[in-house]
Image: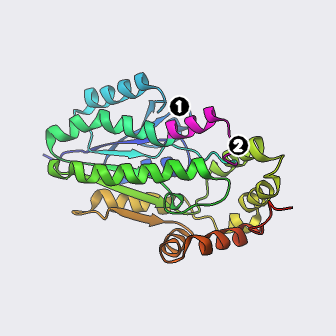
Amino acid sequence: MTVVKTALVTGASSGIGEAVATKLHTLGYTVYGAARRTERLSDVAGIRPLPMDVTDDASMRAGVEKIVADTGRIDVLVNNAGYGSYGAVEDVPMDEARHQMEVNVFGAARLTQLVLPHMRSRRTGTIVNVTSMGGRFHSPLGAWYHSSKFALEALSDCLRMELKPFGIDVVVIEPGNIRSDGSSVTAETLRAASGEGPYAAWAGAVLNALTSQANARRESPPSVVADAVGQAVTARRPKTRYAAGFGARLLIAARGVLSDRVFDHLMARAIGVPSNSGKK
């Protein structure tokens, strides 16, 4: 008798999440696509829509309970839900900073807590945390976004060690520049926080970089991330990290060999604002 494995993918209503959910379905998984708004998921063939808000503990509990009641198992959790909040540290309200961490870190951590008892009881499973190449380096006006992704990387490393005795794999996926709706959200938060004031020159440069045609041409399709997830969940011994999409491998490698100040200068030049732009 063939056992059909079950996967839960958060942030599945568009972009990377939708592509990952579709990929896992083609690999034979029963896939639950979790999102706050599930209307779009009704049009994605083979995906079971699951209302879920990763900042709402009750909705996460209900979602996990439903999956276990339906299928009796959770084999793969893909923590993909997240967004990018940009703005200077001085400008971003602490409520927004907390929300960034709540969505990108604590939601993934809590959902992991909820599925782990089911994985441990069967001594098998895979936790896939979608971070970003931005979880390995920094850029101006992205402090809270980068902090959240750095934190999720560290959380994943600790989890990997803790869960090894139970036969559970922990994998980090580090997307590069991926075509999605996320850039518009990032641009909105940046304009709101730092569109005016002492950091306006930086904000304008970052906004130009986000919305330029050159940037659009460099965006990889979400399918490259989905393919990396597919490789990870089907490997007998998956790698701990998979970089996928434009710029990911190059920039992560550069951060590993360049000094802090040289990398600062590189990022400033790439975005288009001199490193002394804040001086008068």
Q: Which residue is mark 1?
A: 36
Location of residue 82 in the rendering, given as x and y in whole percent from the top left corner: 53, 43
* Label 2 Cα neighbours within 10 Å, binned few <14 / some 14-19 / many ≥20: some
What secondary structure is the magenta-colored segment mainly?
Answer: helix
Q: Is residue 236 left or right of residue 92?
A: left
| Cα distance in 3D space between marks 2 and 1 | 20 Å
Residue 23 x, y percent position in the rendering: 41, 54
Say which amino acid is labelled 1. Arg
* Residue found at x 58% / y 45%: 83
Q: Nearer the viewer, residue 220 or 254?
A: 254
- Confirm whether residue 211 shows in the render: yes
Residue at point 25%, 33% (across, down)? 71
- The amino acid on which the numbered mark 2 sits, given as a three-letter code, is Thr
Helix, strand or loop at disc 2?
helix
Residue 189 has which mark? 2
Is 76 colored magenta in this rendering? no
Q: What colouring style does the render use?
A: rainbow
- Residue range highlighted in magenta: 88-103
- Is 11 displayed left or right of 121 in the figure? right
